[in-house]
Image (cartoon, rainbow, N blue to C red):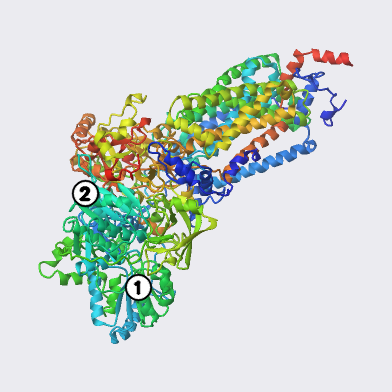
Amino acid sequence: MPQLFRPSSNTIAKVSIAGVVLLLGSTLAVAYIMDRGPWTTSVRIAPEQPIPFSHKHHVKDDGIDCRYCHTSVENSGYAGLPPTETCMTCHSQIWSNASVTQPIRDSWASGKSIEWTRVHDLPDFVYFNHSIHINKGIGCSACHGQVDEMPLMYRVNTLNMNWCVNCHRNPAQFIRPRSEVFNVDYAYPPNQAELGAKLVKEYHVQSLTDCVTCHR
Amino acid sequence: MKHSLIPLESLVEPVKKQATDLQALREKLAAGRGPAFWRTLDEAAESEELREYVEQEFPGLSGQIPQGVDRRSLLKVMAASLAMAGAAACTKQPKELIVPYVRQPENIIPGLPLFYATAMPTAGYARGVLVESHLNRPTKVEGNPDHPASLGSTTIFEQGSVLNLYDPDRAEIVMREGSISNWPTFTGEFSTAAQGIVSRKGEGLAILSGATTSPTLINQMSTLLAQNPGAKWYIHEPSVNPAIRSAAKKIAGKNAFVAYDFSQADVIVSLESDFLNNGPAALAYARQYAKRRAIDNGETPVRLYAIESCPTVSGSIADHRFPVKSSAIPAIAYQLAKACSVAAPDAGTPAPDWLNAVAQDLQNSKGKCVVVPGEFQPESVHLAAWALNSALGNVGKTVRLLDGVEPDNTHTLEELTTDLNNGRIEMLLILGGNPVYTAPASLNFTTAIRKARLVIHLSQFSDETSLWSHWHVPEAHYLETWSDSRAFDGTTTIQQPLIAPLYENKSAHEVLSILLGKPDQSSHDIVKGYWQDQLKGANFEAVWKTSLHDGWIAGIAANSINAGGAVTLPPLQQPAISDLEVVFRPDPTIGDGAWSNNGWLQELPKPQSKMTWDNTVSISPKDAQRLNVTIGDMLKVTVNGRTTVGPAWILPGHVEGSVTVYFGYGRTASGRVGNNIGYNAYAIQDASTPWYAAGSISKTGEHYRLANVQETQTMAGRNPVRATELAEYRKTPNFPTAEEPPLDKATSLYPEWPYEGHKWGMTIDLNVCTGCSACIIACQAENNIAVVGKDQVARGRHMHWIRVDRYYAGNDIDDPEIYNQPVPCMHCEQAPCEVVCPVAATVHSNEGLNEMVYNRCVGTRYCSNNCPYKVRRFNFYLYSDWNTQSLYGARNPDVTVRTRGVMEKCSYCVQRIQEVKIQADKENRPIRDGEIQTACQQVCPTQAITFGDLNLKGSKVAQQQALPRNYGLLDDLNTRPRTKYLGFVRNSNEALSGNTRKS
Amino acid sequence: MATQENLKISELPEIPDPGPDEIIGPGHNYATVTERIGGIVYTPWKRWPGKWWIGAAIAFGFVNLLMLAMYVLFFRGIGTWGVNIPIGWGFAIINFVWWIGIGHAGTLISAILFLLRQDWRTSINRFSEAMTLFAVACAGMFPILHLGRPWLAYWLFPYPNSMWLWPQPRSPLEWDVFAVSTYGTVSLVFWYIGLIPDLASIRDSAPHLWQQRIYGILCLGWRGSAIHWHRYQKAYLLLAGLSTPLVLSVHTIVSFDFAISIIPGWHTTIFPPYFVAGAIYSGFAMVLTLIIPLRSWYNMRDLITLRHIDAAAKFMLGTGLIVAYGYAMEAFFAWYSGDKYESFMYWNRITGPYAVTWWLLILCNIALPQSLWSRRVRHNIGLVWVLSLVVNIGMWLERFEIVVTSLHRDFVPSSWGIYIPTKWDWATYTGTLGFFMFLIFLFVRMLPSISIFEVREVVHHLRHPREAYQEKQ
């Protein structure tokens, strides 16, 4: 009976063993990276907007406070997006002919809303409440990053559940004085550990990790 | 292998049915020891028929599709495939748009709901409500605590009304003879037509409306009638008995209303009255009754005698029920009058033995008792009740005579039919209502209406009447238009709209205003204009604002007429019907048919039968036995030669020789929900004897599949409801736990939860629960609970988070004790469901909530299997309607809309808990007791449900759970339910101990 | 001599049926054994008997039915089944437990009997191991199919995720995940290791080069050298030791799905032993159901002898008695515990809507199998086959009893219900039966369904039948 296999097949056999292991490993690795990478979380990816609105310009250069536009952030679950009216308060005067602000004027004239693309988009089964976080000394930049450095708005955090839970388990790491909440370039002090602990007591901050805290 | 399973398959093949052996059953029960609870005859008989009946309920291996799947199937596939996509661990979120206002209204803060006060008129009478609005989108109706006809509660209909607003089947545009037209064209042509009429001083003009108390409308009408003496105003309210008003008028000598005050009553005798659930003052009465039912501080509770043919909600919690033919009530009333030494004509028949005991009880509590005449009883009964009450010195104490708030000197539907047939009517203007469907068959209204030259129909749906009308104008929903209405006691509410009309909807005011020559007046202007005249002088705008804010106008109420004239009782018109009596009643959940296209109300189990999606012919066990009828057998009901065919429902406690039929079904132009289900009882109604008539029934031989939510099995010696007599209770106040103590806590292997913060708990007082089922539909409205359809209900897949179990007790199936038990999630401290979920989708919170996380659930259904209370509900299909746009509006934005394949259940309205917690936290204060109300608690007319923090010192719920009457359902399993019950205490009359069932 | 191309099994030297106590027909030598068993594998497909084609076709039909049922299930939802509230589990879990149970015989025969040095196991172990694998494959489908959202089944596995969530370790369903997957894997490996020497002999005698190549790859270069055999025996022994505890553990854990809960009829301590016994019971039943036709169709009466049938039947009888004891204990505790729910549950089983299935179950699992006490019955192949079918049915009914009758009337009467399987329930169940049979059909054609080398060992150990045979000449 002739030989069924050439001698090389021994090597092939041995290699294939390692190959299978490697293949499995790498597939898992890729999946893992994909899951946490920007392709999924769209971190640092600025979606296209009807108007190239620059927080950098409005916050840093013009020094406009967050609450000027996001009016309901202190009393409602929603921070609130400014009505065209708010834009027009200035842009009826300045840049009133610029092409970038044309959509504002169109909206004002037609009464049709500007349709923004949501950047910080939580799933519908998550019930996040801005007002209570603001009230407990979680600054805007804690989640939204340094918007005053963003020519176009993008996510700096994944908004994944583990990211939320990380703070909910131990709020002390991210709490700041209420006075600093709207300070976009607030830097956590070196003694954040004890400061946080102190504020947690002061503001009666609870570490809420019950599911119904966010899911209803 | 399959052929070997024939026994199994035989379960699903239709099986020939035999009658339940009721005789054997009666004996079995008569020999029964202790309170053998049972629910249906078949189950009590524990018989072969039960199995067959059950097969009947779940026939066939086919038709796996929930109702309305045709509309949904496409979406289901989409949803499923989307979900498939979700299978990949890494999925991108779809792009989502935010659309801010262009000019944002000042008072609106996105994310914070607003509440507006208004009122929903039912049969004309107002019930004040507060409506929750999200971004100007009404989502939930609550009672207005300051309104005397609501006191913070509502009936099932106020809850259901939200769904009607968003009903995709609503009429959307003005139609002319079936083709699309528009409002301007209509106003134009209508005005021209009107001019002719007006020039003839209204000759030939007929206006038909439902009962109304709207001052503005009445004013408009009186102006109109003044200008056009020839015109006539007819009023038809299908489910209201005109005798109530005519009697009141006889008593007071003028337009009046007889009101009761049960908070002062020691003894109540109901002559077939469902006063706790029916009528303009029902909610107020329920609240008063509940107060007088208190026993925990040694009070002696009120005693209620219910004399009725068919068990009503009020009758179900009576201390004594006397099943009596509806047609025999007039005689009983006269006999009772005689027994209380009131001059009354001869009643013919001798009084039943128990009547004297009742009369004695009444006389023992003079000035502290009430005799309530039945809503559907003739004038004589109402007069007799008044005579009794005045003779017993109740007038001015427990009985008050108030000025009537309905218009006087209007005409009836009978007169309209005559006028139509005599060709006296040229133009018929129908303001609301559906007379073609609701008119008694004897009137042949369908032929009469054709005699009118021009028929204009204003209604929310394009219904049976619209088909016979030349013009159909879409009527505005009460949440869409300005109007006003008055409560039974005259309290006046200005109804403000929560939302602009969704379609081309118009109000009656606007249509009438055309006749008045002001075609382009808006409801707002009409209503406000009227009140400007009324509230002259002092700062109208301020008054107007306050009135809108409070929900009622200060200082306007009906005067009470103290002079209650003595009445002379007319001789008995007709003796009790000796052969079979057919009783006509509005359907418990669908009413006169106006609600028939409302999925929530269709799927709401009817208080006594627990039936959904159908009306039945209620028949007594004795008659069923005599006629060899089993549940679901089709019965042909004949009255005056007219017949209708409906499925039988054997109703324990129903009087022998009588069947009850219900209005509201058998509709042909209702909508996708209400079309072609049930039978039409109007088809056999005779205008001369509208509420009960002599008739006959016979089996057709067919059998019908009914969808009942709790149609199975015996109590097997378990006591979910624990009840006792007052005397017993005085001896052993802890009667519920005396015999069946809860298991010792130490028997658990799991460690105790600390519960340092809040500790939510609930108590349900069975002593005042009437089983009205408002809690079920309130929960449905609050928590976006889906409607599943008849087929799915029949398969045991209804979705209600709170159910109301109804148990029969005692050893007499012809006159059983009836108990109601609402069952929400128990939020066990040792919850069996939590330990078995493989993905931790249902877990315990630090506050003792049993959390259900939809987005984590994979749907093993193990939690439901392991739940001893079976309060968990599963989305076997994609039940939530995701593709009917208009329904989005009705959804509560604070509650996730569940998808296919996930478990759901009562959450103690956790969204409300969180809202209040956040609010209190921001204000840096503790949560007040009663600040958080669950939907079921808030709606409950008798306040039987209490929710709160058990860790809060002196909170109401903590106090109630400390009461001796307090017990937990199945607390011998050591699940340690947080939802507890307060045992039922029956205040029987010793003199009638022969009649009371041993329990 | 006949070349292998045109060699037919019928051309093998005629060997008379062995006596009832012999485990192999007289006159077998190494060659005959190889030809008899291996011959089936390398018979060219043109010569495959019509019976096979018909059987395989029917089985494949049911496989397609299964596919259809799954399609309907995934796109419409679990509502297409008869499950409801309160009966949240129906056919899916019944079939799961049933299949897993069937899956027990294989490992038991090959591992435990191997350790016990039962030489009669040799000619049925390969086949029953294959059966085990296929049964586990069928069983494995159901826990996923019965989920409300099957596409999320992977949440039951502990993997690092961005939700920082792990499965819930207190849930028996979670234990199942590991129990079943472990069992499946080990059985597969055990079965494959067992195959290697035979794959080699097929390679050596297969007619075509491509066959030789394929089997050559599959047998991982087995040359049958002493050192190979030495290592092989070690590995096989180790695996046998490894899988022995699994035989007990798997069904014990499956029984926890019920025993851990609080439902009357589920919440009992007797479940683990009683489930394992039941599993072996049904396992042997299924082995008999399959090998009896097999030995007659492929003319293997001399390899699978009365002795095997008899032994398997005795096993059925024994385990059947343990199961009977289990039933007795359930009844006893229902009465002795004095628990009103327990006693009602049992009474309801006997007299309730599902009484028919209960009495049928007693008939199938307890009454009829007692006839196996008689040697005459055990040696009546037809009768044994019928009995094995009866037991299969009985064990399925037992799972139906446990799952359905316990759930449909539990604690609060208001929510009691009834369970009616739908056509899709039946489609899924019969579909898996078809899937199972289809795999069996492929197996008997593609792989040696009896362990060639082990039978050879037997031949080697028992020379005497051969001498006896020669004397007869």
Identify the residue at image location x=62%, y=31%: C363
Front in this rendered view, residue C35 or B402: B402
Tell me the kind of residue under disc 2.
Asp
Please determine if labels 2 and 1 lie on a single subunit. yes
For residue B936, the mark is: none
Q: Residues within 10 Å of mark 2 (few under 14, many from 20)?
A: many
- Say whether residue C226 is left or right of residue B15: right
Indicate whether B717 appears above or below B533. Answer: above
Q: Given this view, does label 2 or label 1 mark the residue nearer the observer?
A: 2
* Residue B136 visible in the shown view: no
The circle drawn on residue B266 is 2
Q: Position of residue B564 (x, y in %)?
A: 17, 64
Image quarter (top left, top right, bottom left or bottom right) of the C terminus of chain B:
top left
**Residue A52 in the image: x percent, y percent?**
33, 54
Disc 2 chain ID: B
Mark 1 surroundings within 10 Å by alpha-carbon count, few (fewer than 14), some (14 through 19), many (20 or more): many
What amino acid type is highlighted by mark number 1?
Leu
The image's mark for residue B413 is 1
**Is mark 2 in CB contact (under 8 Å) with mark 1?**
no
Which of C231 and C29 lies nearest the eye of the viewer? C29
Across and down, in percent, residue C423 comes to 58, 46
Res A148 seen here: yes
Question: Picture quarter containing residue B902?
Answer: top left
Measure the C-alpha gap from mark 2 to mark 1.
40 Å
* B569 versus C243 height, above or below: below
| Residue at 41% from the left image edge and 46% from the top image edge | B813
Residue B169 found in image quarter: bottom left
Mark 2 lies on a secondary structure that is loop
Q: Chain of mark 1?
A: B
**Which residue is nearer to you in this view: A164 or B530?**
B530
